[in-house]
Amino acid sequence: MPFFHYKAANSAGAIEQGELEARDQAGAVDRLQAMGYIPIQVEVALAAGSGSGTSSMFFGQKKVSQEELGNLTRELATLLRSGLSLDRSMDLLLGMATSPPLQLMLTKIRDDVRGGAALSDAMDGYQKIFGRFYISMIKAGEAGGSLGNVLARISEFMERAKELKETVKSALIYPTILILVSVVSIMLLLTLVVPQFSQMFQESGKALPLPTQIVVSTGDWLRAWWWTLFIGAFLGYRYIQWVMAHPVRRLGWDRRMLTLPLVGDLTTKIEVARLARTLSTLLNNGVSLLPAMSIVKETVNNRVVSSSLEVVRDQLKEGKGLGKPLMEQGIFPTLAIHMIMVGEETGSLGEMLNRIADVYDREVQMAVKRMLALLEPVMILGLGLIIGGIIMSILLAILKVNSLVG
């Protein structure tokens, strides 16, 4: 039977929200009335992370977004640090929630907490949304009696991770626009401009230079088969999905990414910054190194780095420390490894990891700027050469036709 989300007034006049299982909407209303509630709104529930009805069929599953999760974390930290109880804080957050998936998730978590469950246990049912890192941090905060402070640190961590992601994303906007403009310009030349000269060349009845033949043939092909470009793009996208879906293929892809000029260096720095920030946050909030490494291994995106961290974690179990096993992997930057070793020697590993994260956040920004500084002139030069080649091939044909006529 389906679940229904409801808003109803209780005997005291207060508004209650929740979920119940019923045969249909009328059955849900009957159940609420039997419980002594006055139904205000009853609708089919959209479970967090799952879709329902027509909207999910055509538009995919509705989920709690990362932005909503960041706002929730920041607001809950503020409320708890202001002295409010967890139960009261959850009520206030529920009142401020606007999206149905977020409302449903908060309702379930609040009801579990009221039933005596710990916040981390209540969140564990939504692990795909919160992740192991988030829930482990909450458990550490509950154990140490500093849940508000831990939530504030999680919020800060999420903000820094978002900034790093936005830095890379913003850097890709200009090259993407430049590529699109280049492709459109070349296609317009080949499909609209070249055919005007092509007719003139055919009327001359003379053999055209090879460069002109290539350009004319390419233009003819594009006008007749332009739609195959979209099929090719779709097949390329599906191929990437196919590669990413298989662990062995994904490992090979990620290994190649690390060896590419500029891209490999940038990928490594991004992963080191993420690794150091996550591990630092966990260690500084009471999570021991071994379970922290298990969590960190799942937060990095590159499978080669993740596999290396798994080896390092196994060596940690044997008491070999962190710095030396990382160095043996041959992936991580020497500066970061030496800073980790210093942190281990001085007993300030968490603080040193935080410094490493700051250093490599800046390194990522500098690397992105360097890539853009190199990429922009290369792309502009490439576009100029292609357009210049098309124009020169037309001029060669015009000169040959004119010379023959003369």
Image (cartoon, grey):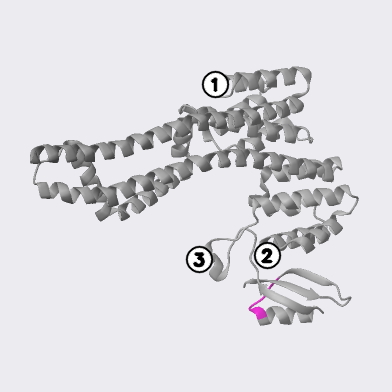
Which residue is painted at 74% across and 41% down in the image?
156
Which percent across, then down, holds residue 253?
45, 36
Quadrant position of the N terminus in the picture = bottom right
Between circles 1 and 3, the one closer to the viewer is: 3
Residue 262 appears in the rendering: yes
Disc 3: which residue: 58
Disc 2: which residue: 100
Which percent across, then down, holds residue 329?
56, 22
Q: Quadrant of residue 112?
A: bottom right
**27 in relation to 273, above or below:** below
Q: Are marks 2 and 3 in contact (CB under 8 Å)?
A: no
Disc 1: which residue: 330
Q: Quadrant of residue 96?
A: bottom right
> What span is colored magenta in the figure?
20-25
Q: Quadrant of residue 358?
A: top right
Q: Is residue 23 covered in magenta?
A: yes
Q: Is residue 301 covered in magenta?
A: no
Mark 1 vs mark 3: which is more N-terminal? 3
**155 in relation to 284, above or below:** below
